[in-house]
Image (tube, helix red, strand yellow):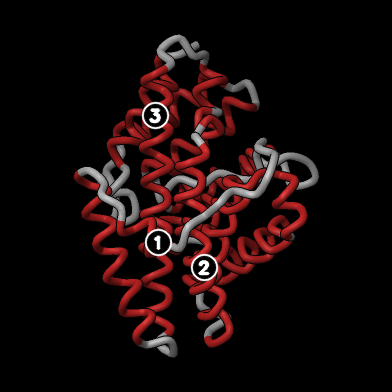
Amino acid sequence: MVVAALLAAGGCALSAPPAATTLAATNPGDLAELDGRTRQALALAEQAPADVDAAIAASRWLFLAADLRLQRATVAWLAAHPEASRAEVLAADDQVADDVRSEIASLCTRGLQLADTAAQMRADDVRVRLHQALHVSLLAWANGPARSLFAGFGPKLVKAIDAAVALDPAHDGAAPLRLAGRFRGKAPWPYGDLAAAEQALARAVQLAPGIVNHLFYGDVLARLDRIDAANVQWQAAAAAAADETTQWSAELLRTQVRERLARR
């Protein structure tokens, strides 16, 4: 599972349609299948608003659908820019077009609503806190720093990440630690902290050596100018098997890994 943080986009707020509208659009192959499963999960949650597990499940599917859009758009940008430097490859997700950002904001707005509702009923569930954090992270990325600051995304994201890590750092392939590392590794001041990012991702890789953990750890090492160490992590990411969370995006992630290894 891949997430961005408070990155550089400004201007007016993105226009985000309802999640049901985004999910009803005609899309190719894997995205159509994932959207179909997400629609089913969302319908179940809306039919039983007091069912915490249904809300969490729908929130999870909404995040997966949003993340797959991000990975597809990132790979498309890389394919269109074969001369990009490694630094540009590392920041390729910043280049995603506004229409994709709008779709992602649409899905994550609804996903966050469901996670927030679940938190009122089961605040100590790591799944609730993780999905609050995941959706806020993508909403902050989609909306940019100025709007994210106004919306209070930064403090809410830190609170949700810290709660998820405290509840179960190993949950879902060490997703709480992965998100903590990714956020600290990409966020601007006052949230950015490469040393903290490295520590979180080293622990994530130790607990769960999966594609995304190795990929994100390599990215932080590269930002610390430790390219040899970064290459080791990216090579491990390329060889890692997909898990339940990354089954939809695994090949897209491996493509991004190969681009990192190939560029200078």
Q: Is residue 187 above or below residue 228?
A: below
Q: Is residue 11 above or below residue 16?
A: above
Nearer to the camera, 194 or 4: 4
- Mark closer to the chain start, 1 or 2: 1
Task: Give SS at disc 1.
Answer: helix
From the image, tell me which residue sits under label 1. 62
Nearer to the camera, 133 or 106: 106
Label 2, residues with CA under 10 Å away: few <14, some 14-19, many ≥20:
some
Q: Mark on residue 256?
A: 3
Q: Examine the rendering and report whether any part of residue 181 can be seen.
A: no
Callout 1 touching callout 3 (CB < 8 Å): no
Quarter of the view holding residue 222: top right
Label 2 vs label 3: CA separation? 28 Å
Depth-wise, is mark 2 or mark 3 nearer the camera? 3
Nearer to the camera, 153 or 43: 43
Depth-wise, is mark 1 or mark 2 nearer the camera? 1
Q: Using residue 109 as the reference point, say whether residue 244 is left or right of it.
A: left
Label 1, residues with CA under 10 Å away: few <14, some 14-19, many ≥20:
many
Residue 188, horizontal then vertical, whole percent: 73, 39
Q: Is residue 18 above or below residue 215?
A: below
Label 1 vs label 2: CA separation? 22 Å
Q: Mark on residue 168?
A: 2
Residue at 47 percent across and 41 percent down: it is 99
Which amino acid does the dot numbered 3 rest on?
Gln
Label 1 vs label 3: CA separation? 22 Å
Residue at 41 percent across and 51 percent down: it is 208
Residue 59, horizontal then vertical, whole percent: 43, 68
Q: Examine the rendering and report whether any part of residue 199 can be seen.
A: yes
Which amino acid does the dot numbered 2 rest on?
Asp
